[in-house]
Image (cartoon, grey):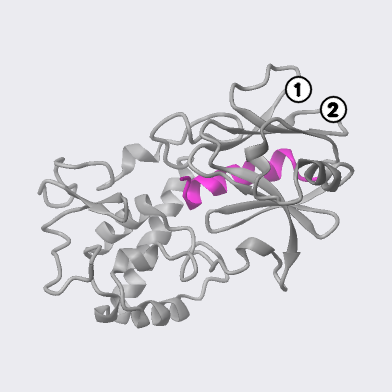
């Protein structure tokens, strides 16, 4: 699933190429792509046609387009969802699920999803910020200007869980996924199973700062692409996978000490770490 830097790359592209344009037509080509919109595809089309896109927003790994009527198009990218800006004259992509046309006759917005785990829905905006209703519980991310580091440090140390599990909890801190959690923990020299209750405040600040730092670096390189399923709105891949220090580098030497990187199963995924730089705690949390 795309993580914060990858989603922010897409958001910036949408801000440049979609915001300010009026929707004139919507075509739903696969019902699974709008399954989260319980009122069905006709309601999606009815609530979008005639509306103008006023902003492209992001909270953590979640992306939405604000409309001029207090609604928003919430995009669930899932494992393989892509939002692409395409010339209407070009043939439809193989896995095109939803297409949106605009009054200016310019590039369409196309939602392409090979595995159909993702989708789009039209949601009401709620709260003072505001946010689409289904993600109103999602916390701010470390790159958010309003991110309250000290409040998150306090909440993190109150948890009774392992450090990586806490970093992946989107209600505590959003945007950090499996890749950048491993990278941040390596930079902070902390083991993924370190009990959060044993963290000092400086250590907690360090790992949150490392997460912000590594995601900012990834953003500069267009995000991390391991295959053709993550691309920006023009279909281009990111290059941060070439700069990763631990993720995906099992048995390769640590960039800091030369020790082979370890990989272990973790929450139906994997954790990568250096056993020397990130020693296992005496009483790790499961």
Q: Position of residue 281 (x, y in %)?
A: 15, 70
165 relative to 99, above or below:
below
Q: Residue at x 50, y 64 (%)?
A: 141
How would you rate the neighbour count of disc 2 (Cα within 10 Å): few for under 14, some for 14-19, many for 20 or more?
A: few
Dot 1 falls on a residue whose secondary structure is loop
Tell me which numbered mark, 1 or 2, is placed earlier along the sequence: 1
Q: Is 168 contained in the magenta span?
A: no
Name the residue: 35% across, 39% down. Answer: 241
Stretch of the chain drawn in magenta: 1-20
Q: Classify 234 as above or below 221.
A: above
Camera-side residue of 186 and 272: 272
Q: Say the numbered circle drawn on residue 61.
A: none
Quadrant position of residue 144: bottom right
Q: Which mark is residue 88?
A: 1
Residue 123's quadrant in the figure? bottom right
Q: Residue at x 43, y 46 (%)?
A: 218
Horizontal side, residue 8 vs residue 210: left or right: right
Q: Do the CB atoms of the residues marked 1 and 2 lie less than 8 Å apart?
A: yes
């Amino acid at each position: 699933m795309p993580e914060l830097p990858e989603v922010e790359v897409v958001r910036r592209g949408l801000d440049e190429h979609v915001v300010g344009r009026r929707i004139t037509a919507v075509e739903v080509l696969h019902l699974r792509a709008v399954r989260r919109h319980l009122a069905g595809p006709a309601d999606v089309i009815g609530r979008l046609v005639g509306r103008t896109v006023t902003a492209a927003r992001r909270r953590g790994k979640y992306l939405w387009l604000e409309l001029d009527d207090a609604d928003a198009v919430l995009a669930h990218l899932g494992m393989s969802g892509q939002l692409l800006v395409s010339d209407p004259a070009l043939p439809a992509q193989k896995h095109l699920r939803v297409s949106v046309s605009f009054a200016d006759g310019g590039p369409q917005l196309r939602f392409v999803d090979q595995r159909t785990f993702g989708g789009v829905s039209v949601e009401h905006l709620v709260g003072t910020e505001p946010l689409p209703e289904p993600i109103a519980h999602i916390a701010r991310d470390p790159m958010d200007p309003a991110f309250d580091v000290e409040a998150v440090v306090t909440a993190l140390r109150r948890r009774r869980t392992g450090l990586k599990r806490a970093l992946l909890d989107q209600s505590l801190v959003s945007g950090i996924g499996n890749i950048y959690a491993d990278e941040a923990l390596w930079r902070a020299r902390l083991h993924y199973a370190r009990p959060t209750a044993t963290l000092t405040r400086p250590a907690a600040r360090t790992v949150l700062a490392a997460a912000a730092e590594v995601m900012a670096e990834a953003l500069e390189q267009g995000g991390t692409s391991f295959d053709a399923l993550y691309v920006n709105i023009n279909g281009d891949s990111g290059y941060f996978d070439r700069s990763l220090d631990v993720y995906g580098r099992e048995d390769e030497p640590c960039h800091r000490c030369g020790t082979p990187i370890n990989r272990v199963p973790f929450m139906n995924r994997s954790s990568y770490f250096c056993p020397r730089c990130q020693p296992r705690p005496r009483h790790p949390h499961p």
